[in-house]
Image: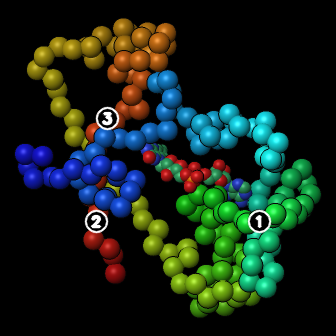
Amino acid sequence: METGVGISEDLNGDQLTGLSVVQTTSKDGVRRSSATAYLWPVRHRKNLQISLNSTCTRVIIENKIAVGVEYYQNGKFLTVRAAREVIVSAGTIASPQLLLLCGIGPKKHLDSVGVRVIQDLPGIGENFQDQIMYNLQYTLDEPDIYDNNWAAASEDLAFQTGPVSCNGLEQVVGAVASKAT
Ligand SMILES: Cc1cc2nc3c(=O)[nH]c(=O)nc-3n(C[C@H](O)[C@H](O)[C@H](O)COP(=O)(O)OP(=O)(O)OC[C@H]3O[C@@H](n4cnc5c(N)ncnc54)[C@H](O)[C@@H]3O)c2cc1C
């Protein structure tokens, strides 16, 4: 802050520059995946069906409306229809890939690879950016708990607290690189 770097309350929000506390999906000092944090605790809900080892291969679109998905499981292609809506959340790379395979994306690109265009939507599959990152490391003048790695490791193993229970980063300064043209 003394150097003029501002504060970002939420680096996963719309304020991408500034000093911020690192957010992690963690509970009780242990990192979790989205699946273990959100899905597994509610897996017994009657209105939830989880299909394991299934790879979505296509969103089924009728009259420009997503009505279901096709997926591959145990050597078979299966389909499921949506009661209300289809939410694509396959991550940074696979989400746009699925949309492109269905014909949703920039027309010029879809034409060039022989995919029938359902919706000309520039931007799909574009603007993928690296998250450039560098670390600043300092030697501490005063001894602290980090000098005793075994004590810290034992504390983490026994109680999931202490410096080792941190995800490795506590604070981060976010910056937006100028967009390449
Ligand atoms: C090393 C690393 C460290 C990170 N640390 C942090 C952090 O400290 N704090 C933070 O806020 N963010 C962090 N992130 C970013 C964060 O993990 C992502 O922003 C977040 O996971 C995105 O969630 P998502 O649900 O959109 O996608 P994902 O978590 O990528 O989930 C997509 C899921 O879809 C599945 N999938 C893909 N294709 C298909 C398909 N065809 N059919 C079926 N399933 C499919 C994948 O297997 C995956 O399980 C980190 C990322 C990385 C890689």
Residue 24, above or below 147: below
What residue did someone put label 3 on? Answer: 170
Q: Residue furthest left?
A: 2
What residue did someone put label 1 on? Answer: 84
Real-space Cα distance between discs 3 and 1? 41 Å
| Dot 3: element | loop
Residue at (64, 69) in percent of width and height: 97
Q: Nearer the viewer, mark 3 or mark 2?
A: 3
| Residue in the foreground of this view, choosing between 117 and 7 | 7
Q: How is the image coloured?
A: rainbow
Residue 98, above or below 72: below
Tell me which numbered mark, 3 or 2, is placed earlier along the sequence.
3
Residue type at tag 1: Arg
Residue 103, above or below 80: below
| Dot 2: element | loop
| Residue in the foreground of this view, choosing between 122 and 37 | 37
Q: Residues within 10 Å of mark 2 (few under 14, many from 20)?
A: few
Q: Quadrant of the C terminus?
A: bottom left
Tell me which numbered mark, 2 or 1, is placed earlier along the sequence.
1
| Residue in the foreground of this view, choosing between 180 and 26 | 26
Residue at (31, 35) in percent of width and height: 170
Q: Residues within 10 Å of mark 3 (few under 14, many from 20)?
A: few
What residue did someone put label 2 on? Answer: 177
| Dot 1: element | loop
Real-space Cα distance between discs 3 and 2? 22 Å
- Quarter assignment of residue 100: bottom right
